Amino acid sequence: VEPGFPTGLLVTLDRSSRSGVRSQLERELREAVQQRRLAPGAKLPPSRTLASELAIARSVVVEAYTQLVAEGYFEATQGAGTRVCRIPAPPDAKRSSSPARLNMAFTTGLPDPAFFPRKEWLRCYRAAVDACTDEVLGFPEPRGRIELRAVLADYLARVRAVRSSADEIVICNGISQAIAVVCRAMRARGASTIAVEDPCFEAHRRLVAACGLTPVPIGVDEHGIEVSRLIEADVAMVLVAPAHSYPSGAVLSPERRLALADWARQRDALIIEDDYDAEFRFDRTPVGALQGLAPGNVVHAGSVSKVLNPSLRIGWLAVPDWLLGDVIDTKFIEDVATETFGQLALARFIETGAFTRHIRRVRPLYRARRDQLLDALRSQAPDLRPQGAVAGLHLYVRLPQDVREGDLIAAAKENGLRVEGAARHWAAANETEPAVLVGYGMLRESTILRDVAALIAAVRDAGGPRTGGDAGAPPPVARR
Amino acid sequence: VEPGFPTGLLVTLDRSSRSGVRSQLERELREAVQQRRLAPGAKLPPSRTLASELAIARSVVVEAYTQLVAEGYFEATQGAGTRVCRIPAPPDAKRSSSPARLNMAFTTGLPDPAFFPRKEWLRCYRAAVDACTDEVLGFPEPRGRIELRAVLADYLARVRAVRSSADEIVICNGISQAIAVVCRAMRARGASTIAVEDPCFEAHRRLVAACGLTPVPIGVDEHGIEVSRLIEADVAMVLVAPAHSYPSGAVLSPERRLALADWARQRDALIIEDDYDAEFRFDRTPVGALQGLAPGNVVHAGSVSKVLNPSLRIGWLAVPDWLLGDVIDTKFIEDVATETFGQLALARFIETGAFTRHIRRVRPLYRARRDQLLDALRSQAPDLRPQGAVAGLHLYVRLPQDVREGDLIAAAKENGLRVEGAARHWAAANETEPAVLVGYGMLRESTILRDVAALIAAVRDAGGPRTGGDAGAPPPVARR
């Protein structure tokens, strides 16, 4: 499969050794790079291939690759570690040659994989495929399956006070594509700019630009997007997450909600409402979607990525009538339609109540993790200032002024901890106050105190005298 | 669910009547429109709602809606019949008030839904979800799952002589999105034009334009795209289907294959190879993919849409190294990644040999349908000239010069037969020779003679003295 990669020569595993197979494999691969037996730029074999050649579980290979990516020996474009780094491993990578896997406990944007209700999901999927007629296997509908659109219209009305019908729902591959089809439909109608929150999810700023719209950053404070500044700006479109701005965690205040809806109606503007994690709200009654205030001026976007899992790639739009045809056309041209069976499975999952039961089950678990995290931060590091705690799965933690974000990320990495910086989500990444994003979706009760201690130790390390020059590795790719 | 639609008033079904429930429902709805009890523009309830109110199977409602869309009473944006037509039903819709469903036997671009191996698919899907680790439920990889990329690299090498590794495969939502991410990645590198075949799949011409590239039509004759004209044109990119040009059905000749690959290498140009139905080749040994001749200059694109079903929305790219990072970035920005479980199911489906077994099983069935169609056309209408029969699931049938395509489509519809015109796939739709596309993926042995007779009758009807003016309804939305 991979000629030119002489696996047999490179890796020798001693199964009788007390050190695990994985750490042996990591050491072997690390040394192969250090000794230039694996040249810079060389391709690694697919994990499947190597696992089969070595007669070990593929997961062991995947973990070893991941570790060596984290250590800077291997290079992974977008997550698949399959090439030896072209850039020589930094000297400190050698220093930390004890096989310390990076601790991902604070990863943001991901629900706990252990919560995914796979039995229930499989039951719904099987029932959907078993029941499907030839019509289902005909041309896929660009708008999405009526079964899912119908239950979503009901669900969104009930839970989010969205005012729409099944006709006005369009199924997309998660929120990113949902935003893309709206932006492209508007671009084709002549739109050229779109206001975005500052800070906002960095990938979305790139996305609207890829759709041909110039992003116009509008500040976010503790009450959400500054609507007065939006009004001053010469824009007729805005992308906003009123329920839980990312990454700041701000919730749009009631006054600004009304002002935003008024602006849209008076300006005849379009609001794209990114409702990415509205299901996880902890401290007060959920506010309804902005869409309910101005259904003719708001496109509402949501997905199952936070409630179930981003791997499912199912999102939706509720689209005002005047824009609906254009959005459906755009979706058709882009990729015909979203995959059908997953839609039918999700329709059953929602219809049978499994979706609501699942939210009811996991919400208190996430809330408990958040509370533990806040308590630990408060007691161990009162000078850190967590924000945005009322909802979602992450905190925005502001750092003492003398801490550089890049230094902290490097110091944390040195201690085996992965930390996400906030700077990249700001329009002017160089001028921001230092902050990190601390996810709690995957925190475990048994390890949280240790994890928080490691984070704080890294803050202290980074707060010491600067070592000068750049702090080393760039922050990891941020995903929401 | 749908206030304002007084179902109870509108539809009365007599279950003791000898006429079927469906034809009763169709008649009731038709009369409601004719009598303006259902106003132009009024929304119909979702089929699920109406079915449950009437206590009938939802499929009956779906079929009735479909029929009334075909008759012009209801309006369906992209296939979901849910609104009363705003345009008054044409007078001839009343004439054909006998409930004649449109016969879809000649639909192109769709494999027979009855062939979909749903048990085997479900088995693979269940095994994939059962086996998946937390890592699978982490952030989805923009490039696609390594399990699928690894088996696809093997499969494409074996079956299509594609030269790529698992690293160079990128999973997309079918071929449309695959083309879109390549075009956008090239646009970002400064590309502004792309040569396309003339005729080519109309939606792809719109797609490349949506990606910011100006399509430059290059003629296709019986030997495929005219490479000499491509060389004359000032372009550095081309979208081409060498194995089976759509819709003409031309196969690129060996000489032109070499010339095309040479051109790409010398011009440092990029070829997007659309390999959409290469698995269905009947009359000679398959030629390998063009990609194998110039792996550094060809992006190879394929999908499961013709072998399994377009509802699965799984396609792939094999991308040259120099473009790979840009393509993965584009895919990430557009929609993060393609849905995961379907990828894992497909990996198993291919790995266990089910994919190859399936192709081996259905290829002779499609071939038999094609042969029957050709025989019937030859004996009943020797003046029609079918082309492109060596591969795929459709014929390009040229019509006598005195037949206008629009007239034929209208005449066929009058006789209850849906026929797809070829004109829309040409760059200059008004100047083309009259032709229709005749799919045989869904032909049944028992009805083929009747279906062909209906088609020929429509040709004869349309060949008579013109009735003047436009021929009525536009042709249905073409899908490949």
Image (cartoon, coloured by chain):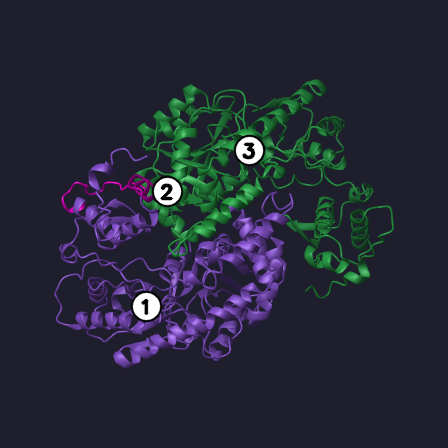
Chain colours: A purple, B green
Query: Which residue, given by chain and number where applicable, does mark 1 sit on?
Result: A437
Could you classify mark 3 by the number of other residues whose Cα lies within 10 Å: few (under 14), some (14-19), or many (20 or more)? many
Q: Is residue B293 above or below residue A139?
A: above
- Front one among A48 and B201: A48
Q: Mark 3 points at which residue?
A: B426
Location of residue B383 in the rendering, given as x and y in whole percent from the top left corner: 68, 19
Camera-near label (3 vs 1) is: 1
Q: In which quarter of the image is residue A447?
A: bottom left
Badge 2 element:
helix
SS for tag 1? strand
Closer to viewer: mark 1 or mark 2: 1
Numbered mark located on residue B186 in the image: 2
Can I make out residue B207 in this image?
yes
* Closest to the observer, B306 or A316: B306
Q: Mark 3 lies on which chain?
A: B
Viewer-closest of B369 and A61: A61
Under mark 1, the amino acid is Leu
